[in-house]
Image (spheres, rainbow, N blue to C red):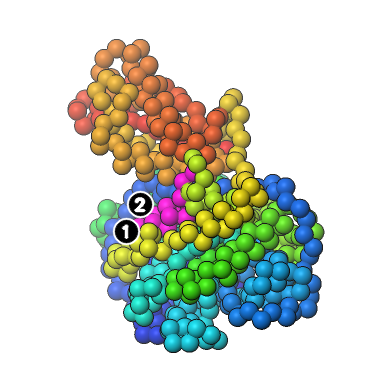
Amino acid sequence: MKRLTPLGRITIVALILAGLWGLKWLIMDSGYVMTKQLTTSQDVGKVDLPTAPKNASSTVQAMSLPGEKPANLNSPQVRWLMWAWNAQMGAILANGGSETTEGSIMAKKGVNLKITRQDDVPQMQASLIKFANEYKSNPSTPEGAHFVTIMGDGAAAFLSGVNPELEKIGPDYRAQIIYTCGKSLGEDKFMGLPSWRDNPQSAKGGLTAAVLRDGDWNIVVKWCGDNGIRINPDETTYDPDAMNFVAADNYLDAAEKYIAGYSEDREVVQNGKRTGEKKRVSVNGVATWTPGDVNIAEKKGGLVSIVSTKEYRSQMPCVLIGIKKYMEDNRPTVEKMIEGIAEGGDQVKSYSAALDKAGELSAKVYNEADKAYWVKYYKGTQSADKQGLVVDLGGSAVHNLGDNAEIFGLNSGSTNVVKIVYDLFGGVASKLYPKLMPSYPKSDDVIEVSYLKDVIAKAGSNVSAAETVAFTNDANIKEKVSEKSWSIEFESGKASFTPQTEKTLNELFNDLVVANNLRVEIHGHTDNTGDPSKNMNLSEERAFAVKQWMEQKSPNNFPQGRVQVFAHGQTQPIVPNNSPENKAKNRRVTIVMGK
């Protein structure tokens, strides 16, 4: 489990800081009032994410567990603010808790690290800015924080509120992403009616309680995009043809709104226009995380996991963010810190004693629950809800060097997960809320892999490889997660792509690599021009062309057996073949992802 308090989640919307401490963007007590206006429900399209690596089964040697006494180190203290999140267990184990202890991995490397739980995002931002301001004149300043960790899908919004202020100090003071400590692996989820899972289109007109523009809200947005369901960005209206939202104060409040049967009267809109009708609508979906999902299961039940970070496993890497100038001035310390986090991750992955110790230390660092609790929800579990439905609860993972080489696209055949996640959700926020977040820092300016590269180079053959998911060739999808048609242009009568198709293929590529534990079906279709048998062959050749393009672009994300091809020729038109426009719609590729 992670981020247990209401303040512990990053919003996808930019938090724009003013002055030294900054303005909170979309924080209710800031005094900022968003002008309410009618907005049209939007098709956000496919929300494309790359596949994050599965936790490796390390073959590293067991290390001694950290002691309890503070280490006597002469090195300057490094301060790190983090949420309560199991993805950071490797770092906590490596440090021996909040402060570096004797016998810990960090102590052996000479890293004097102070870890503090901080669930308030604006305070994280303010601490980075405070540190940078003081560091310019006093490199030994005790003020502020050197590092923070947040969700990767919220990084663009987070940094859009931080870097404009930091760059006023100087361009070398911007905040940068340098490492991933782990990821959410199931605990962050979209829960809804069982019918939505069985037939995603039945979710149109749904009303989901969520912390708007938060990471779990992102899961709903992505799932809707994957299934061609529009998003209504105005939480004051109701669109029966889109997914609608109720703003929750926090993830527990989102769950409680469903449990309490929260309802409200809303103006009905269709295609961006008021119909003059008012409708009483009730919450029937929730975006939450543990223990919000536990509360739903135990107090009311009736909702199932529609999709989570178990499927969208690359959406929430736990990204480590630091100040560029400080990191450049203290490169040896930063690299030793990365080494320590990675080694701690290897231990948690490999040894139950290390996991248990990490759970014990997490309870102390976060001042929450006990060892058994943190270990249980790190692993994830299942439970029957009040109505007898089985629901998944919890699930996180830690990363090692091998995972980071894969997630930053440093391995042959891999793709830069962090960059795509950053750009993707920054783009989603800008598209749905252009006035509130018109832009965000460029990913090329804020993702810095040189520290990771140096650490990997020094480790040589001692880097544990990230595991890949194996698929059998004969298995079919049993449970469909998403289905959507893509307009991929081919040369007339051929299986070769047109030059205009490259952009669409790249968008599709990013979408398909979101979940490396899901199977992919590529269904080829044609119009009714020509001989039916030839069209059947042509649809198969075109589907294979898409499959081969994906596999060649990133073999790691498309291992053998993951993608299957189906040919339908002209047998399944979606519109009558009575015009050039309709024929073009029938020449399509349909992508299905499932378990």
Disc on res. 112: none
Q: Residue at x 32, y 56 (%)?
A: 41
Q: Which residue is mark 2?
A: 44
The quadrant in which residue 356 appears is bottom right
Q: On the rendered image, what quadrant is the C terminus found in?
A: top right
- The residue type indicated by label 2 comes to Val
Residue segment shown in magenta: 414-429
Q: Which residue is mark 1?
A: 431
Residue 286 magenta:
no
| Sooner in the amino-acid sequence: mark 2 or mark 1 | 2
Residue 558 % position (x, y): 50, 36
Residue 475 is left or right of residue 26, and the answer is: right
Depth check, front residue: 362 or 570 = 362
Residue 196 % position (x, y): 50, 46
Residue 424 magenta:
yes
Residue 8 % position (x, y): 55, 71
Secondary structure predominantly adopted by residues drawn in magenta: helix
Depth check, front residue: 209 or 240 = 209
- The residue type indicated by label 1 comes to Lys
- Is residue 261 shown above or below 395? below
Q: How would you rate the neighbour count of disc 2 (Cα within 10 Å): few for under 14, some for 14-19, many for 20 or more?
A: some
Contact (Cβ within 8 Å) of mark 2 with mark 1: yes
- Is residue 83 shown above or below 19? above
- Is residue 15 shown above or below 183? below
Q: Residue at x 56, y 53 (%)?
A: 457
Q: Residue at x 48, y 59 (%)?
A: 450
The quadrant in which residue 369 appears is bottom right
